[in-house]
Amino acid sequence: MSERLKDLFLREGIEFFSVLNFEKMKIANQRLASSIGFTPRSVIVFLVPYFVDVPENISVYAASYDYHIVIKDISSRLTSEFKKLFPEGAFSSFTDHSPIDERYAAVRGGLGIFGDNGVIINEKYGSFVFLADIITDLDPSVLGGDVFFDIKGCEGCGRCKAVCPTGILRGQSDKCLSEITQRKGELSEEELSLMRKCDTVWGCDACQLACPHNANPKATPVLAFYENRIKRLTEEYLDSLGEEEFKKRAFSWRGRGVLKRNLENERKKDS
């Protein structure tokens, strides 16, 4: 059955997945775990690579449509196929907001290692991967067996810590630049200046781009990440987006006001 699952995932451009026993997982959200609607016995955790290129003033993940939309579509197609294979089975899919600790599951599933900057690093796609999982009431043996790898971390070369703009990775701050760019309300002049210095209006990839595991990132085979990409976020582009199109972008969840503020701040760089 593992080969059949492999074929289904490869159709979606997904190479790395693992089947784990739900009882061995770390519960990250008990409320979600209790509301699944069935007794979970297995977790299929998988990586969705997303790297295409490096945009100019936004994070790599935000250059295409919101990954939640992409992964929701992928998971929907996968669970539909799983239901054909296992009509008696129940399935529930998640990404980011999951009952389990997805990073722990990914490492225990042998899909990557823990990076010092808190991300999962995969052997082929580096840290440019999203995590997702499908929880089911089927026994792991039905899906091809249960795996459980030792937890491993990166080599600790220190490059991600050295380039961190705020110093949070060095223990010198409690704020990440990515969080600062997404915060509503007023920002301090120091924060605004840091955004200009790092040429960002949304997100920060400094630690990822410095990582040696990302020296030559492999491009994603997931075609959805090539569609409707932007190289640089501008006020003209932002104004051209209708509400429906705007809501499809990863940078929309904090509203236009935050982006307008950040773009206005960016203009000060050249003034």
Image (cartoon, rainbow, N blue to C red):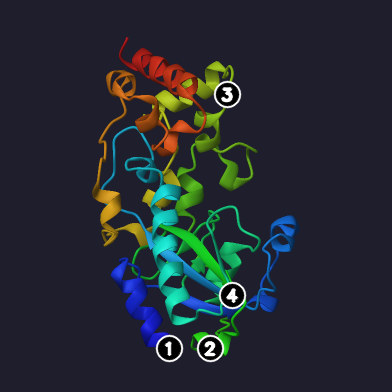
C-alpha distance separating marks 2 and 1: 7 Å
Sequence-first tag of 3 and 4: 4
Foreground mark, 3 or 2, reads 2
The label number, if any, that marks residue 1 in the structure image: 1
User: Which comes sooner in the sequence, label 2 or label 4?
Assistant: 2
Q: Is residue 136 above or below residue 201?
A: below
Q: Residue 89 or 60: which is nearer the viewer? A: 89
Instruction: For the residues labelled 3 and 4, say whether their Cβ atoms are less than 8 Å apart.
Output: no
- Give residue 205's mark: none
Callout 1 amino acid: Met
Please state, as top left, top right, bottom left or bottom right, where the N terminus lies in the image. bottom left
> Alpha carbon of mark 1 to alpha carbon of mark 3: how far?
48 Å
Left or right of 191: which side holds 62? left
Q: Which residue is mark 3?
A: 184
Q: Nearer the viewer, mark 4 or mark 1?
A: 1
On residue 142, the disc is 2
Q: Nearer the viewer, residue 107 or 47?
A: 47
User: In front: mark 1 or mark 3?
Assistant: 1
Residue that extends furthest to the front in the rendered view of this protein: 87
Disc 4: CA contacts within 10 A as few (<14), some (14-19) or many (>=20): some
Decide which of tag 3 and tag 2 comes sooner along the chain.
2
Secondary element type, mark 2: helix
Left or right of residue 219, residue 113 in this image: right
Q: Which residue is mark 4?
A: 151
Give the amino acid type for the residue marked by disc 4 in the picture: Ile
Q: Is residue 152 visible?
A: no
Tally the numbered discs.
Answer: 4
The amino acid marked with disc number 2 is Val
How far across and how far down the image is residue 29, in percent?
A: 71, 57
- Marks 1 and 3, the one that precedes in the sequence: 1
